[in-house]
Structures are given as structure tokens and as C-alpha cells.
Image (cartoon, rainbow, N blue to C red):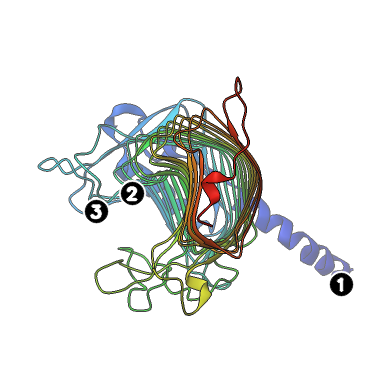
Amino acid sequence: MYRCVFAILLACGPLLAAEKASESFDVRAFGAAGDGTTDDQPALTRAANAVAQNKGGVLHFPAGVYRCAAQKRMQNGIEFVGVSGVTILFDPGAVLLMDNLNPQTGLGERGHGILVRGPCHDITLTNVAVKWAKKPGGRSMGDAFRFEGFPDADRCISNIKMIHCSAEFSPQTGAVLMGCSDIDVEDFRVSRTYADGLHFNACRRIHVRKFTGIETGDDALSFVTYQDDNAVNVYRGGPGSFARADLGEWNSNGSSAADICAKGGGANGVRLAGAIDVKLSNVTVEGKLRGVISDCGKKEGNKHSWSWLASRGIAISNVTAIGCTSGFYVANFNQPMSGDDKWWRFDIQLSSFTARDCTSDSLLISDAAGVRVRGVTAQNQGIHIAGARDCTLTDIDLKDGNFLLHNCRGIICSDVRIVHPAGEGFGAIEVFDSRLEGIEVGDPVHPATTAAATRRR
């Protein structure tokens, strides 16, 4: 009988532990008022500490506005360090209001909205809304959501879920995740941040479904992994993730993003830098510097603060860029293309791309290799391929613009239709070992097919 009882206790142990870990902690029970006026910072700290002491659980916010005022020292709104099995649950109408800007400068330097520092696992945020009480005086410290892990299986933050969350007016990013693994972001909305909307650095197995970035000061969505062996602690307050010299599993490997909308603000809609094996689909970008960009750069003197490699295994489909400076842009910032090709040879496939009313280029590939483009509809600005190698461009419809190839080698360009061209419409200057065919240039009323523009090929 004793053996049976012991066996039952052993079997029930994990269930009892799970039940304990899911215990709910209502922030109002720890003194939070949620009236938008009271400083709820001390109460939220007490509630978070209780979850930590319980070794996990649910931090519950009933409807209300929970104000975090500036403290005498830097204080994050909610902070968990090395605690697993944590759920932060906001009821509809609950808001974490960060009122902690420096009163003299208006800058953010007094803490983040929500900070999770690893190593830990199983972190879930549901309906969490973080908002700064006023617009900061400039880009400064203060992320709405910040995850500080490390790109190592034993030191990362793993199994993160962010569901129906939002960020507004943050001095830095809407959400930044560093050294994290197995991430699911669903229906995340960011508006008027000073830096990126959603930023992944040295993470793996990321899945984003439905993301909206409105007037983000920097990239709306970015998958980046930097390398700087002398700066592994670049991010203040955390270990950072700055030592990825080769494309591997911590370079956004095994990731996807779908149903992305970015509108207004600075920099790019989506940026891929030092990434491998990423699928991007159903993207609309309006009024940004670039719609989608994949770039690489090497730290050389004062040229760059760190290095990042040319992205590979990238599949991009169904992209629309409206009113951007450049709609789609692939660039190598380390001229010339020589030496180790990890610094300049990409592996990118783009299909079903539409660009309208861009102010510089609908599509630009500069000093890069390994880009394949199929199915482009562009209007009002042209396509420019300069210093490129081993690229393919097929099934292109261009209206009111021109298509220029310059200083290229190993280019396949076919099935190009240009109407209402600007100038000659199609030009190929110093293009070698390439195949250009099926290039149609002319006015639909007086159609003409021309090869004259390619005479300097």
C-alpha cells in the first residue's frame, strides 16, 4: 500500500508543481490602484516579487491604468530575472502607463516597461499594453518590452509568447529580444516609438503573425545579428548578443513573419541583416525610407560600430511598397566585392513585389550577389542594378520609369515590359557574361521593341 501511495505522489508531483506555477497574483491585492494617478510602481514590484518567490505564476492586471512614476533610481515597470513559467495577463482596458521620463530633459533613462532577463523559459504576455504618458524628448533608454537572453541553449530565454500586445511612445523600441529562442508574436501593434518597432538580435525560431508598426522612428520590424568580438556587452544592463561571426542557428534561423504592415516614420519597413533561413510574406510598407531592405556591413575604422553578414536562405513574397524612397533594396556596404563572400553574397528570393510612387527607386540592388527577383509591378520610379553579380530578374512590368543595369556580371534579365519609359527605358552599361532577352520598351499606343539601349553591353 505504501508503495502505491508513493507511486501516486510521484505521478502527481508534476501536476501539483504545474498547478502551483499557474497560481494567479492580482496586482490590486498588492496595493495597485489602477486609477492612472496613483504611483503603482511599488505595488507592481511587490506583486512581481511574489510571482518570483512562487517560482512562476500569473501576474494579473484587471482593467485600469497602472501608472509607474519616476523613482529615485532606475526602476523597470515590471521585472523578472531568471524566473520561468511566468504569464503577464492584462484584462481588456488594462494599461501599464510609464510616467518616468527625466523631468529636466524629457528623455527616457529611468527604466523599461517590462524587462525579462534570462536564463529562463516559458514566458507568456497576453493583452499587455505599455504606453508612455507623454512623448519623450528624443531617442533614449526605455523599451516597452525587453528580453535579455544570450545566444546559447543554456543561457537563452526560450518559449516566449506575445499575444495581442501593444506599445506606444517608447523612447527606444516597442520590443527588443536578444538571445531568445522559440518565439511566437501574434497581433503586436507598435506606434510612435523612437527606435525599432519589433527588433530581434541573435535569436532563433521566431514566428511573427500580424504585426503593425505606425510611425516607428527606426525599422518597423528587424531580424538582425551583429558581430563585434570586443563589444559583447553593448546593451546596457544585459549580456548582449554581439559575437556571431558566421551564419548559424542564432542568426534568426528557422524564422517567419507574415501579415506585416508598416506606415510612416523613419528607416525601413522590414530589415534583414546577418539572417539565415527566414520567410517573409504579405508585407505592406508605406511612407518609409525603404520598404524591405537586406544589407551587410563590416566594421572598418569609424565606418560602422559593428559588423553584420549578408543574409542567406531568405524567401520574400507578396510585398507592396508605397511612397517609400526605395521599395526593395539589397546593398553591400563593403566595396569592392572581394575576399570572403560572406560579406557580399546574399541568397534572397523575392516574388510578387509591387512598388508605387517611390521617390528614388522601385527596386535597387547595389554591390551585391545572389538576388533572384520574379514578378515585379512598378510605377513612377525605375529599377537600378549597379555593381551586382549573379542575379536574376524576370517577369517585370514597369510603367513611367527606366530599368538600368550598370557594371554588372552574370545577370539574367528576361520578360521585361516597360511602358511610358523615362528616356530610353532600358539601359545596360558595362554588363558582362549576362543574358538579356525579352525586353519590351514602348508606348502602348505606338508599341516598339528595342535593343538599342543595350548596345554597350
The disc labelled 3 sits on which kind of residue? Met
Q: Are marks 3 and 1 in contact (CB under 8 Å)?
A: no
Residue shown at 21% from the left, 47% from the top = 71
Give me the residue at 61% from left, 23% from top: 444
Residue carrying label 3: 74
Which mark is nearer the camera, 2 or 3? 2
Under mark 1, the amino acid is: Arg
Rendered-image quadrant of the C terminus: bottom right
Q: How many marks?
A: 3
Front position among marks 2 and 1 = 2
Under circle 3, the secondary element is loop
Amino acid under disc 2? His
Q: Secondary structure at mark 2?
A: loop
The residue at 46%/30% (across/down) is 380
Q: Are marks 2 and 3 in contact (CB under 8 Å)?
A: no
Q: CA gap, disc 2 to disc 3?
A: 9 Å
Whole-percent x, y for residue 89 in the image: 53, 39
Say which label, 2 or 1, has the lower sequence index.
Answer: 1
